[in-house]
Amino acid sequence: MALVSDLDTTPSHDRPSPDHGGARRRPGADGPLRAVVTGASSGIGEACVRLLRARGWDVVAFARRADRLADLAERTGAHPVVGDVTSDDDVARLVAEAGARGPVNAVLNIAGYGLGVDHVDEAKVDEWRDMYETNVLGTVRVTKAFLPLLRASHRGDIVLMTSTAGHDTYVGGSGYVASKHALLGVAKTLRLELVGEPIRVIEIAPGLVHTPEFSLNRYHGDQAGADAVYAGVEDPLTADDVADVVTFAVTRPHHVNIDSLILRPVAQASTYSLWRAPLEPKGVPAREDTHRDD
């Protein structure tokens, strides 16, 4: 299956060189575009690093797990920085290391997680606080710290990874839903605050994504509970699916902004509506050789 980000509809006379990852650069700028990716050690963050590196971007990969980052750096050539988005000192060190490499053109705020499935009347406030610290305040901390470098690049992108949980609600998701609604509010407000500057604010909101860790963490290591989230669902999104959309957004000509993009698997009609059976057209005989694009 061809990745969306491989499709370049830019007219040939206006298409930049492949070294620029399909994105228009500021006139006179030299070197590759540079991105910082948080939450880079696994899942969507790891996939974003791989896809941007494949497009020729210089990537600074930021996450807590040093062993995972070292492996990612060896595989992709990304520059690893170990740290936590909830730490002022770690984020300051990230800014210093990224800025030392040259202009920073994009910050991909991918770090985030869900924890617990309790109803509000049984809410564990500490879990809500932990999610808010990472999903919202961590994103704000990183974005604020990098804004001077994004402004200096004259070609800045800020990606905020929300969720369909930021556009909808569902039973048992209140803490995560609240954090993602808050992050959506940050994205919308920040876009208004930066109008008039050459900085894009891009909100990407995935639905059901099957990664090895997200639901497992949410269910506190209960593999059966995590597996039940995806049971019977044909082709949930993958980390690569989401990273492909992120890559598409940041490689558009810089006058084009993907303000907000929701992506879901075909089997998901809303945050709480999942089809847990094979996808079959109504009134049409089943075919064993049904065409698929993968």
Image (cartoon, helix red, strand yellow):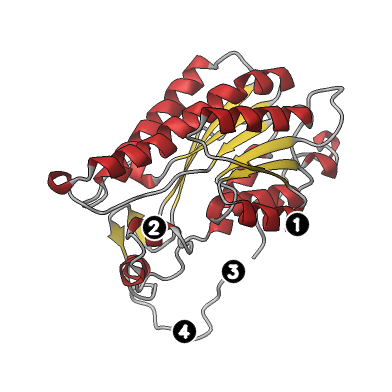
Q: Residues within 10 Å of mark 2 (few under 14, many from 20)?
A: some
Q: Identify the amino acid type marked 1.
A: Glu
Q: Identify the amino acid type marked 2.
A: Asn
Cα distance, mark 2 to mark 3? Answer: 32 Å
Q: Is residue 293 above or below residue 197?
A: below
Q: Which residue is mark 4?
A: 287
Give whichever of discs 2 and 3 has the lower sequence position.
Answer: 2
Element on which disc 1 rests: helix
In the rendered structure, are the residues bearing label 1 and label 4 in contact, judged by CB atoms less than 8 Å apart?
A: no
Q: Which disc, if any, is residue 217?
A: 2
Q: Residues within 10 Å of mark 4 (few under 14, many from 20)?
A: few
Q: Residues within 10 Å of mark 1 (few under 14, many from 20)?
A: few
Cα distance, mark 3 to mark 1? Answer: 31 Å
Q: Quadrant of residue 276?
A: bottom left
Q: Which residue is mark 1?
A: 74
In the rendered structure, are the residues bearing label 2 and label 1 in contact, judged by CB atoms less than 8 Å apart?
A: no
Q: Is residue 238 visible?
A: yes
Name the mark nearer the viewer: 2 or 3. 2
In the rendered structure, are the residues bearing label 3 and label 1 in contact, judged by CB atoms less than 8 Å apart?
A: no
